[in-house]
Image (cartoon, coloured by chain):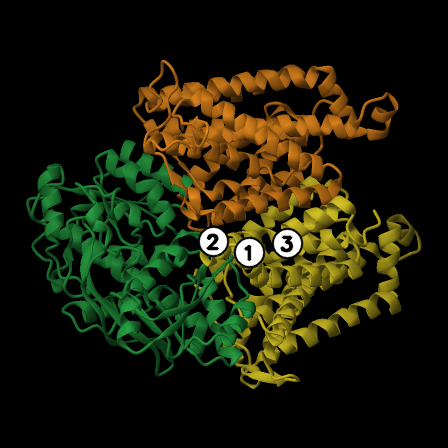
Chain colours: A orange, B yellow, C green
Amino acid sequence: MIRREGIINTLIFLSLPAVAGAALLLDEPFTITLATRAAILALAAVGLNLALGLGGLVSLGHAAFFGIGGYAMGILASHAQSYVPLIDTWIVIEGTKSMPVIWLVAVIASAFAALAIGALSLRTSGVYFIMITLAFGQMFYYFAISWPAYGGEDGLSIYVRNDFPGLNTLVPIQFFGLVFTILALVLWAMGRLAASPFGLALNAARQNAERVETVGLTPFRLRLVAFVISGAITGLAGALFADLNRFVSPSMFSWQMSGEFIVFIVLGGIGRLFGPVAGACLFVVLEHMLSGVSEFWLIYVGAILLLVVLFARGGLIGTLAGRAVAHD
Amino acid sequence: MTTLLLIEQVLNGLQSGIMLFLMAAGLTLIFGVMGLINLAHGSLYMVGAFAAAAVAGATGSFVLALMASLIAAAAAGAVIEMVVIRRLYDRDHLDQVLATFALILIFSEGTRWVFGSFPLYLDVPAALAGPVTLPGGILYPAYRLLIIVVGLAIAAGLFLLIARTRIGIQIRAGESDREMIGALGVDISRLYTIVFALGAALAGLAGALVGAIQSVQVGMGEPVLILAFVVIVIGGIGSIKGALVGALLVGLTDTLGGVLLPLAFGVFMDASTATAVGSALASMSIYILMAIVLLYRPTGLFGTV
Amino acid sequence: MTLKTMMAAACVAALGTAALADGHGGKVKVGMITTLSGGGAGLGIDVRDGFLLAAKGNDSLEFVIEDDQRKPDIAVQLADKMIQSEKVDVMTGIIWSNLAMAVVPAATAQGAFYLSPNAGPSALAGRGCHQNYFNVSWQNDAFYEAGGAWASENGIEKVFLIAPNYPAGKDGMTGFKRTFKGEVVNEVYTKLGQTDYAAEIAQIRASDADTVYFFLPGGMGISFMKQYSGSGVDKTVMGPAFSFDQGILGAIGEAALGVKNTAHWSKDLDVPGNAEFVSAFQAEYGRLPSLYAAQGYDTALLLISAMGKADVKDADAFRSALKEADFQSVRGDFAFADNHHPIQNVYMREVVKEGDVVTNKLVGVALSDHSDVYGADCEM
């Protein structure tokens, strides 16, 4: 059975470059863009999955990190675009159009935000945790809307996609390759992390916190570290998402965005490394196909989601692999 | 700012708090008895408002409209409880969040399908349309006073219901020990449906009452839902008393924050900066309040869990 | 797959744009991205319906219509798709300024024409103007500047301003203050999406302003007007037409009676073609047309007029043809300024009751042949 799931994971994962490659041959650049979108949303959900799947922390505020990553890109690139230094006092810091620098800033900024939010939120648990993360997300959302310096609700447009050494990122397939590589690296790292002593302890803390405490580990610390890594990955995805659209706006902070990340994880299959990837791909395909069927296509999305939650608890991968519950 | 204006603003905060209580009471009751987190509660609020607008449009009677909102929301609540919600009681919160998130999508787009994309018309009855003069010479809209009175009456009724009646005893028993009441021969699934329908009816009534002075449109429930969650988290999930205190705190913070913060910043800033900073901070004020409460009391003011 | 591709065939003789379907322009593929689901869908549906009404029966137009759900990221992706995969010639349809800011620069940079049927952010009228971007509606400030000018000329001395705390709200108030000569007693910026205005109304009551000028689009405006009329405050209320459009008036009802609002169009505007448009729209869709429907309709007329003069593949010629704006707008005289934004009259309207229907009536001209102030920064 495990082998069967492994095959399914590989197939789902390889379907992304396969679709992108086929689209390249057929000269359908928009399909490549869709595949890139799916990969980026998958990356954001992979980040959340560390907190949610492994750590059992249902965060309804991960859009905060997604948005911070997006604004890291937007703010740096807009300063580079207008040749106005970001900070111009005793030290001069210029904006930048370099993707690696932007990614670094996005990861660090969202990690710090996750540290602050996590340190406060993890004092609570259960429903309180869901609600306080939601509240922090809303705080960022309203702040972004009413903060005039970077466009407020209008958002920020970046006219040209940022640069990566050796690539022309405006060519859809090259940008896709870049995003896909990052997704693959992060998935690999997540797989290693889950199997590491840290990952095992985190998983144990989710199942039985007292037992973890008796062996001398602090569940709070384990969870906080997981929450910070999780936020940083989602932040990185936010920077890529902003670059895909060449645009960033407060809608990246909205609570529906946080809800969608959770939807990806559950659609794909909770507690599975490749679950978010499968879920994000499925969601993008559904969104793309159903919106042509009816003006009221969200009804169908709701119905499908409801059916998955009620009757197909293993999600897409679980259903295909024939196992309801993942590794535990 | 004059004292009279301040009193009027406090009344406004009180009124918005009372309305929030009607929403939050249902949410917290449902959580307390069934352990269920219901994101679709805002949809029931919307159902109530749309039902009231439709009936008011057809009959012209505001009283009938209010009754329709109660009936429609309670019916919608009972139906989703029997079809969907009862499968979620023994699931974890994640499944509950997702399934009720899905219900929001279905309700919102379904309502848009039936009623169209434009807001509906629902107005306060002519007898309550104007302002009344309160002691001290404050002019205050009669309808808002009515909301305060109705809300307080319902709060009192709810406390009585839970403290004195047979169903209230069952509810309290259900909150403390779910297996026990089953063993005592109470029909649990019927009790759950009743509690859920009761919560839904309160939300629907709030939707209709507020719909008369706000816009009746698809998506009206979600902002209120998020506020109601803030309320019950501050008050302590499962506690009706907490919901009342939390609702008043949130209502007052939201209203007075929007008025006072720009003024406060105006003391040491120029007017336009003060307006900008004050308004930005005011829009975040209730979330800051919630974060502070949870820091000192991680289970809310009256929470026990 | 996702496309709602529509093909239409016939001619628009009654509207003075006949004989164009067989002009020398070839087929034109129009990509329309507009809001058709979720909040604000009413506006997008009206723009689409107005546009399709004018294009009805024109078999040289081919449509790709997509729903942006009012989400900027979706709009950007749809624009990429339309340009890269569908290879559309002309794009249109976006309702919201923030979505326009996300889509228009990318679309025009890739060589497509963009005709704006509703949004006119200042950035796109000034330094960010583009030769392929034509605004057929208004620059965002126009209605507010008209409101300020009308107030100054009609003896209004002290105003109380209220708008949501976001860029369009602040721009609107700036526009009003640009032309208003009296005193601004107070400016209040509320939370975006706020539904209860009791606190603000109390501030209005306590102030010594004689007029309230507000911009609260959509549901916010409905809530404000209903609560204002119940509060017993009797100061004059003014605003831009966005809060008093036909789709919204039905929800406010008599609470809106007497409110003055500025717009470039009104259904009782006596210009050639307007009455025909109103009755044709009612016959086709069974409801009164809104401002947005009129803008969608005019956008299609502009496009059809240019197709009669030039081939869309010849970008320079087509651009000149668009610039001439040789069509009979339902707003009356219409021309493009050098930054491709409208020169047009803005009128003052008043909300009245006609029979059982609450609707708008023309009061007079607030600003004639008005254009925006940003054109000076536009270099194209």
Mark 3 vs mark 1: give the one in front.
Answer: 1
Instruction: Kindly indicate whether the residue at mark 1 contacts the one at mark 3 (C-beta within 8 angstroms).
Output: no
**Residue C360 shown left or right of residue C185 in the figure:** left
Whether residue B25 is situated above or below residue B11 in the rendered picture: above
Outermost right residue = B184
Above-or-below relation of B159 to C129: below
Question: Residue C362 lies in what quarter of the image?
Answer: bottom left
Identity, as a three-letter code, of the amino acid under mark 2:
Thr
Q: Residue at x 35, y 58 (%)?
A: C174
Mark 1 vs mark 2: which is more N-terminal? 1
* Mark before the other along the chain sequence, 2 or 3: 2
Q: Residue at x 27, y 35 (%)?
A: C83
Res B125 quadrant in image? bottom right
Q: For mark 1, what is the residue?
A: B265
Among the 4 quarters of the image, the one containing residue B192 = bottom right
| Residue at mark 2: chain | B
Going by the numbered disc 3, the residue's amino acid type is: Ile
Q: Are marks 1 and 2 in contact (CB under 8 Å)?
A: yes
Q: Position of residue A140 (x, y in %)?
A: 55, 43
Labels 3, 1: one chain: yes
* Label 3 crowd bin: few (<14), some (14–19), many (20+), radius 10 Å: many
Q: Which mark is residue B273?
A: 2
Name the amino acid, label 1.
Phe
Q: Residues within 10 Å of mark 1 (few under 14, many from 20)?
A: some
Q: Residues within 10 Å of mark 2 (few under 14, many from 20)?
A: few
